[in-house]
Image (cartoon, rainbow, N blue to C red):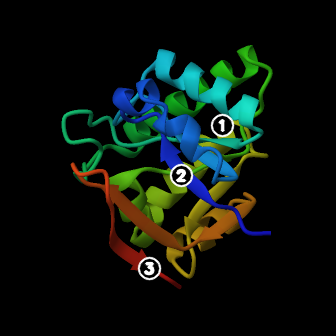
Amino acid sequence: MMDINSDMGEINRLLGDGTYEKLMEYVTSINVACGGHAGDETMMAAMVALAKEKGVNIGAHPSYPDRENFGRIDMNMDANELLDTVRDQIQLLVDIGTNNGVNLSHVKAHGALYNRAVIDEEIAQTIGEAIIQVDPLLKVMGLAGFKMLFVFDGLGLDTMAEALLIVLMNRMEHCEIENMMMH
């Protein structure tokens, strides 16, 4: 079965204008920003409620603690600090889900953290350990054919290999395909 997922809970305007709700008609799962690069508890709760209503799977979308740069800048963090921030972000969304009668299905790292984990086994290991500390039954998404999935598999996590299609909304509300990676 193919999963079509989208990152959500990152931009308040998209909640207010109904964009997130409309997008949920076309996806099977969402990756909810957990406060590291964007989002907050209010936005996370709104995303959980919408996904529950639409029957969409919910995943945590942890990142480097980098709201200023939207999680797009690689950060050299101590492994314990990274473990703590990723674990705490995932746990926060798990708690919000539990309070709303929803279980999370997966975790997908965001931005620079994801990109680094694609090629850096130590970063992937740290993300995997954070997931295990929260819930070892959570699936983890990673880029097909790259080191991160092998690391996650080695930790005993259930993995979901993905290909990325990144779509940006420009000011004219037209979609532009920025990058497509198929592996």
- For disc 1, the marked residue is 133
Residue 148 placement (x, y as % from top left): 53, 68
Residue 46 placement (x, y as % from top left): 57, 22
In depth, the one of 144 and 174 nearer the eye is: 174
CB contact under 8 Å: marks 3 and 1: no
Is 155 above or below relative to 42? below
Which residue is situated farthest in the bottom direction here? 183
The residue sitting at 69% across, 67% down in the picture is 153
Give the side of residue 153 with respect to residue 65, left or right. right
Give the side of residue 163 with respect to residue 65, left or right. right
The amino acid type of the residue labelled 2 equals Ser
When asked about the image quadrant of residue 60, the answer is top right
The amino acid type of the residue labelled 1 equals Gln
The amino acid type of the residue labelled 3 equals Met
Number of residues whose C-alpha sits closer than 10 Å to that of mark 3, classed few (under 14), some (14–19) or many (20 or more) = few
Residue 13 placement (x, y as % from top left): 35, 29
- For disc 3, the marked residue is 181
In depth, the one of 155 and 131 nearer the eye is: 131
Residue 130 placement (x, y as % from top left): 57, 42
